[in-house]
Amino acid sequence: MVASPLPTECTPQVKHPSGAAIIAAIKAAGVGEIVALPDIVTSDGLLWPISRDPEFRLTRICKEDEGVSICGAMSYNGTRAILMMQQTGLMDSLNAIRAIGVDYELPVVMMVGLQGKEPHLHPDQSASYGVRIIRPVLDAMELSHSLIEWPGDEAHIPQAIEVAYATSRPHIFLVGRAPEAS
């Protein structure tokens, strides 16, 4: 016997941010380099459209911490980059972020999909331990971060990237809902 899915009236309907609006905000911040590992949360709405966009150069990597190094190195010549990954890779890369972003004071900007997060819950309320601990860990490390979950959240992307580069500090965008492909 196959279990039937929950009725739609039990599953709250939520709006998702626009992938096109996020991409436009990234461009508005002067980012032309995307360093990425595929992430199930951001692939359809962000990574695949970025891979087809001639205004971006996409560098595919095998390990998240090498992406931290690549983005940090690009900042030396004024090249703005974003590292895209999911939260498991973020957790795996914390030492590289600490060394390169914090100790060496390099503006590593990351867009992190919160894989396994329930769309109708705030990350701090997620049943997924790996999602629930992300913000407290980033707070403990004093790493700047913001949440992208709703349409309109992309409006703060250019300013957050500007601040990261002006202060030479990391910033992490936590993507809690899969951006709509547009």
Image (tube, rainbow, N blue to C red):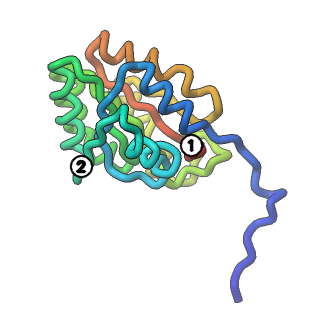
Q: Is residue 20 above or below residue 75?
A: below
At label 1, the amino acid type is Pro
Q: Is residue 133 visible?
A: no
Q: CA distance from mark 1 to mark 2?
A: 22 Å
Q: Position of residue 91 (x, y in %)?
A: 32, 45
Tag 2's secondary structure? Answer: loop
Report x, y in % for residue 18.
60, 37
The residue at the point 54 percent across, 39 percent down is 19
Q: Nearer the viewer, residue 172 or 55?
A: 55
Q: Residue furthest bottom?
A: 1
Q: Is residue 165 left or right of residue 96?
A: right
Q: Position of residue 172 (x, y in %)?
A: 39, 31
Outermost residue toward the top in this view: 166
Identity of the residue drawn at 29% across and 32% down = 33
Residue occupied by mark 1:
179
- N-term-proximal mark, 1 vs 2: 2
Question: Circle 2 sits on which residue?
Answer: 61
Q: Of helix, strand and loop, which one carries label 1?
A: loop
